[in-house]
Each structure stands twice: as C-alpha cells, then as structure tokens.
Image (tube, rainbow, N blue to C red):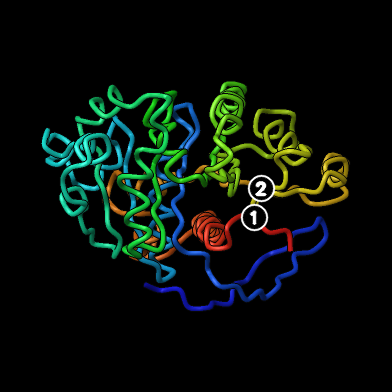
Amino acid sequence: MNSTTKTYQIPNMTSETVEVKDVEREPITGQAVSVNMLKGGVGKSILALNIADRLSVRGHDVLFIDLDPNGHITESLGYEDVFADPTHDLTNIVIHEYGEFEEYIYPTDWEWDFVPASVKLSTLESELSDNSITLLKRNFVQPLLENEEYDYIIMDGGGEWSHIAKAAYGAAARTIIPIPPGDMNRSGFKRTYDRVISEMPDELDFKILAIVPNMITEFIKHDKADRRLLENLNRSETFSKYLPSFARIPPKDWDAIDSGEIDVPKPGLRKNSNLENALEEENMPFGRYIEIQDSISQNDELTLNHLDELARIIEQGGVTNE
C-alpha cells in the first residue's frame, strides 16, 4: 500500500498570472469514487479509465470497475471473452453473497486491477432496487477497502438512469461528474443532482469531489454551448466550488475576456482525439499511449496535466481553493 507523503504542485489561476504553490498533503486513501452522470455520451468511461491509471502512476494500488452494461471499455481493453462469459456475474456476490472477490478481478498490464463488465450486468440491474443502494458497497467495495487491498476503487458508474448507476453512487459516496457542453447534458446533470445526489441518505456522507467541464471545443469568447456551460458553472454559488483549477475563471474575468482586456483562456478538459485513439487503436490508457509517441502536442500535455489534477483531487478528498 503506497500512502507516503508527497509534495504536489497546485496551480492557483487568476486572469493575470498563474501562481504555483507547493502543498504537502497525506493522500486520503481507502476511497471509492464513481465517475458518472445519468446520461450517455458525456465521456465518463474514458475519464474513469484514465483517472484510475493516473492514480496508479502516482504509486497507488487501484481497482477499476466497469459497470457500464455496454462494456465499451472492457472490450476495448481486450476482455471480450470475459464480457461474453455468463459466469462473470456480479449478481452472485453483490446480491446473493457467495463467491470470492478474486473470481471477478483481473490484473492488467498497467499495474492496476480491473473488474470487467459483462452481459450479466443486466441480471444485476434486474435484481437491484431503489432500496438496495448499499449492497454493492457492503458486499464488494467496502470489504476490499477495509482489508486494504486497494488505496482507491474507481468505478465507471454505468450512465443513464439505472439501479446499477445509483448503486455505484451509493457504493462510492464520492463522485466526479463530467459535463460536456449542450442543453441536454446540462439537463442530465440537473437530473443527476436532483434525483440521485440530493436524495443520498445522510449516513453515506456523500460528496462531490469534482465537476469536470468535458469535451470542450469552442473558444469561450463566443456565446455558444461551451461558453454557457463554463460561465454558468463558474458563476454558480452551488457548483463553482467543485471546479478543478483548470476549469475555474473568476466571475470578474468574463467581461474582461469579452472586451479583449485579457487573453481568452481555454478552460476545461478539452476534446482530444488521442484520448480515444489510445483506447481504440492501442487498447491502453491515454498516459501510456503518449509515452510511446515520438512527440506530443500541447493539448496532449495539458490533457495529461488535467488528468493528474483530477487524480490529485481524489487524493485530497476534493477540490481545494488554495
């Protein structure tokens, strides 16, 4: 178990300068995190995969659980046979409480472990209910954390509205929420917040670790979906505190951006074709993919830095505003 004290570089961004402060913190291990929003197409699967990988690179013991019934990440990583295997059924251990953890956990080439999705997730979905939100936590996630098998368990929470997605939120009680531009995505976030997050039982001590404006493509000087998403989140008294430093713009800066008084920044996790290429072409996480490239673009470098910041946010137990 790797929980040694580390020194991190935390950027404090303003409109005129970027200061970097050295902050020494002990990583908060023993956490499970669900990366999810109750809408498809928001980039949650790739984000979850790469956050798990960056935590592993940072020296932690990590388990990544794919709870997406579509199994996109599972098949892309080369576990097609497991996905199609009807005996790979989490229902057995989560609902009926028999079987061993090792039956579901596979090692990977990147020094983190993996629970692949399977065709039997539909069975788990049918046997879960709104009243069984804690079963995944009690019978699978929590024992692994209590036995110190892993420092972090990262879950691709499944997406869309489902009992599995809700169970993943309950099992983790910690979440990172990706939100791409677009009114439908903003509605999906509102639905997630109103129907699940706000309804979490007090005893779960549920916490949003970060909200990530994701798949940003446009300059934010123009009144388009990207601008509306970023400005609304930054101006929100409720949600601005969850934005990573790479997505934060002080409210006073928006008029200055429009008037040309300051350069137009590029906040948020921007769309990067190599995030998908790494998985689709080389069947590996993004960071491992760019390691084998002869050169990397500025966008690749920024993307990796942002993923590392999200890993650091998990280590810290949330966004800090230092």
* 4 versus 45 height, above or below: below
Kind of residue indicated by mark 2? Leu
Quarter of the image where the C terminus is located: bottom right
Which quadrant would residue 136 be assigned to in this image? top left
Nearer-the-camera pick, 109 or 113: 113
- Whether residues under marks 1 and 2 lie with C-beta atoms below 8 angstroms apart, the answer is yes
| Nearer the observer, 109 or 277 | 109
Which residue carries the number 2 mark? 243
Q: Which residue is painted at 68% across and 64% down in the image? A: 11
Crowd tier of the residue under label 1, counting other residues whose Cα lies within 10 Å: few below 14, some 14–19, many 20 or above: many
Secondary structure beneath disc 2? loop
Picture quarter with the N terminus: bottom left
Q: Nearer the viewer, mark 1 or mark 2?
A: 1
Q: Quadrant of residue 84?
A: top left
Residue indicated by mark 1: 319
189 to the left or right of 73: right
**Callout 2: 10 Å neighbours few (<14), some, many (20+)?**
many
Which residue does the image show at 76% across and 37% down from the upper left?
A: 236
The dot on residue 98 is: none
**Amino acid type, callout 1:** Val
Look at the picture and state if 157 lies above or below 30. above
Q: Residue 34 at x, y = what percent?
A: 45, 44
